[in-house]
């Protein structure tokens, strides 16, 4: 009887550990669909063979996130267009641009651009409507992030859901083991 109880306990622990490991791999799978793929893709756009290019990182809710090598005159909207535009749940009203030289954008007088802790938040939808894209020039090593629309499951929510399912899994296993071992005494 005692052995059974120990075995039952060990089983439950082993199961819960493996399901936690499974849940974590599941979780990265779940969130992996939302985030950019692990290997960053690189895209090169030249308008003439000898043109020197700048590299800009573009991540988030665009069709083709990755590292873009583009002419120095490229502006934010052009970059997003090259990336295939919004991937269906990118939020174009809050595009985050982290400039290596933030001063270069300090002069921009546009309702669509707000400075935010050394970065800029650009309402690309406004820029599309009212113009002014040309002044949003990108430079070497700038970083652009298109956030996902907030109705997506946040990572915290995903984590909570995972945790709940793990706990339920442990409880159910314990009950099942209980049923199975309990039926042997009769």
Image (cartoon, rainbow, N blue to C red):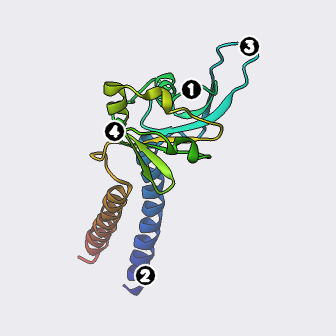
- Note whether 99 is above or below 5 in the view shown: above
Q: Marks 4 and 2, how far apart in space? A: 58 Å
Residue that badge 1 annotates:
74
What secondary structure is found at the residue carrying circle 2? Answer: helix
At x 44% / y 73%, what residue is drawn? 13
Residue that badge 2 annotates:
6
Quadrant position of the N terminus in the picture = bottom left
Q: Residues within 10 Å of mark 1 (few under 14, many from 20)?
A: some
At x 31% / y 49%, what residue is drawn? 153
Task: In the rendered structure, find residue 49 and report the number of the disc placed on it.
Answer: 3
Residue that badge 4 annotates:
93
Quadrant position of the C terminus in the picture = bottom left
Tag 1 near tag 3, CB within 8 Å: no
Q: Residues within 10 Å of mark 4 (few under 14, many from 20)?
A: some
Residues 175 and 129: in front is: 129
Evaluate whether residue 63 shows in this view. Answer: no
């Amino acid at each position: 009887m005692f052995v059974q109880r120990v075995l039952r306990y060990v089983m439950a622990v082993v199961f819960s550990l493996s399901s936690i490991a499974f849940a974590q791999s599941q979780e990265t799978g779940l969130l992996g669909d939302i985030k950019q793929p692990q290997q960053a893709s690189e895209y090169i756009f030249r308008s003439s063979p000898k043109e020197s290019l700048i590299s800009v990182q573009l991540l988030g809710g665009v069709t083709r996130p990755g590292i873009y090598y583009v002419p120095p005159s490229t502006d934010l909207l052009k970059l997003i267009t090259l990336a295939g535009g919004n991937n269906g749940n990118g939020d174009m009203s809050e595009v985050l641009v982290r400039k290596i030289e933030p001063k270069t954008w300090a002069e921009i007088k546009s309702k669509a651009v707000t400075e935010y802790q050394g970065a800029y938040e650009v309402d690309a939808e406004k820029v599309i409507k009212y113009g002014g894209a040309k002044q949003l020039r990108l430079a070497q090593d700038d970083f652009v992030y298109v956030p996902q629309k907030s109705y997506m499951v946040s990572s915290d929510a995903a984590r909570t859901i995972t945790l709940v399912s793990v706990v339920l899994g442990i409880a159910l296993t314990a009950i099942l083991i209980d049923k199975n071992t309990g039926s042997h005494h009769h």
